[in-house]
Amino acid sequence: MADTKPKTSPKAIKFLFGGLAGMGATVFVQPLDLVKNRMQLSGQGTKAREYRTSFHALFSILKNEGVQGVYTGLSAGLLRQATYTTTRLGIYTILFEKMTGSDGRPPSFILKALIGMTAGATGAFIGTPAEVALIRMTADGRLPADQRRGYTNVFNALARITREEGVTTLWRGCVPTMARAVVVNAAQLASYSQSKQALLDSGYFNDDIFCHFCASMISGLVTTAASMPVDIVKTRIQNMRMIDGKPEYKNGLEVLLRVVRSEGFFSLWKGFTPYYARLGPHTVLTFIFLEQMNRLYKTYILDR
């Protein structure tokens, strides 16, 4: 019997489409990323808050830095997606296909979670340099003019970090970045799958984009709550300066303890609103772009 296994796109195309989908979504949610980073760095070391709410932060940025200010660090955000999301979605797709049974049966939920965590951690390691540049570029506008780093774009940031602080600084905060990716992927997979099934079982939803959006927003709430303490550790470490030749923080545990002691326990969830508002739509937009690119590739390339 002839092999009737459907044609699939080459691995390089899977990686390419994954990165392009993430980059397309980032163009829409970059302002939320900037607000989240500013919120996580505000009132550092004190109980005083630089911004009262996420909306206050957004309006302050618009007032002081203009409309272009909310897109500060966009080049770093795009490079982060080109490295992190390309690797994460590419590895996930490849491992998923390898673990799919010969009868077409998909891998078990546990296996899917493990694949997601592996892909997430690997992607996070590859994407850490762009992440460091993104954190620093989005944080710059809140500093006095004489303390700003003044990176002009992501490549200028990477070059200056390497020249001024050493190449290993590009991977500063790599461990919490990878830990965050593992938490995000595990929480996202579990909560998205359960939310989608619950919505479909309710009888009020069909398996369409609206259902996927609602499931993503529910999943985003769970994922945000689970991953934000790790995310604030990552943000603080990647933005820290050297004080008298010593790093501001020794490790992630010190960041957590100092935040709780100096700023209060709930400060671990600073920037919750923009983080949550970014996570759901970014996931939905990424997969919508990905599905459309795969559909067009299948229509105009594979099926010809």
Image (cartoon, rainbow, N blue to C red):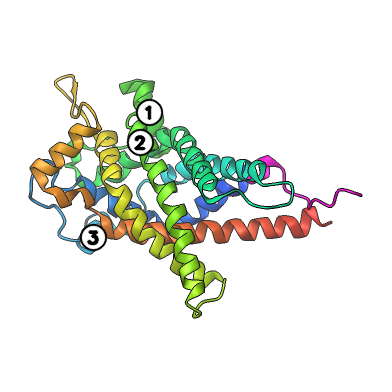
Secondary-structure class at tag 3: helix
The residue tagged 1 is 170
Secondary-structure class at tag 2: helix
Q: Are the residues tagged 1 and 2 within 8 Å (C-beta)?
A: yes
Residue 32, visible in the rendered structure:
no
Judge by depth and name the residue closer to the eye, 117 or 26.
Answer: 117
Residue 282, visible in the rendered structure:
yes
What's the amino acid at mark 1? Leu
Task: State left or right for residue 16 relative to residue 170.
Answer: right
The residue tagged 2 is 132
Q: Where is residue 68 in the image (x, y as percent from the top left)?
A: 35, 55
* Dominant secondary structure, magenta: loop
Task: State left or right for residue 59 relative to residue 132.
Answer: left
Q: Are the residues tagged 3 and 2 within 8 Å (C-beta)?
A: no
Judge by depth and name the residue closer to the eye, 283 or 196.
Answer: 196
- Measure how far apart labels 3 and 1 are at the Cα level: 28 Å
**Residue 35 occupies quadrant:** bottom left
Crowd around label 3: few <14 · some 14–19 · many ≥20 (10 Å): many
Please report whichever mark, 3 or 1, sits nearer to the chain's N-terminal start.
Answer: 3
**Residue 80 occupies quadrant:** top left
Q: Where is residue 232 in the image (x, y as percent from the top left)?
A: 26, 44
Q: Are the residues tagged 3 and 1 within 8 Å (C-beta)?
A: no
Crowd around label 2: few <14 · some 14–19 · many ≥20 (10 Å): many
Crowd around label 1: few <14 · some 14–19 · many ≥20 (10 Å): many
What's the amino acid at mark 2? Val
The residue tagged 3 is 54
Q: Give the range drawn in magenta.
A: 1-14
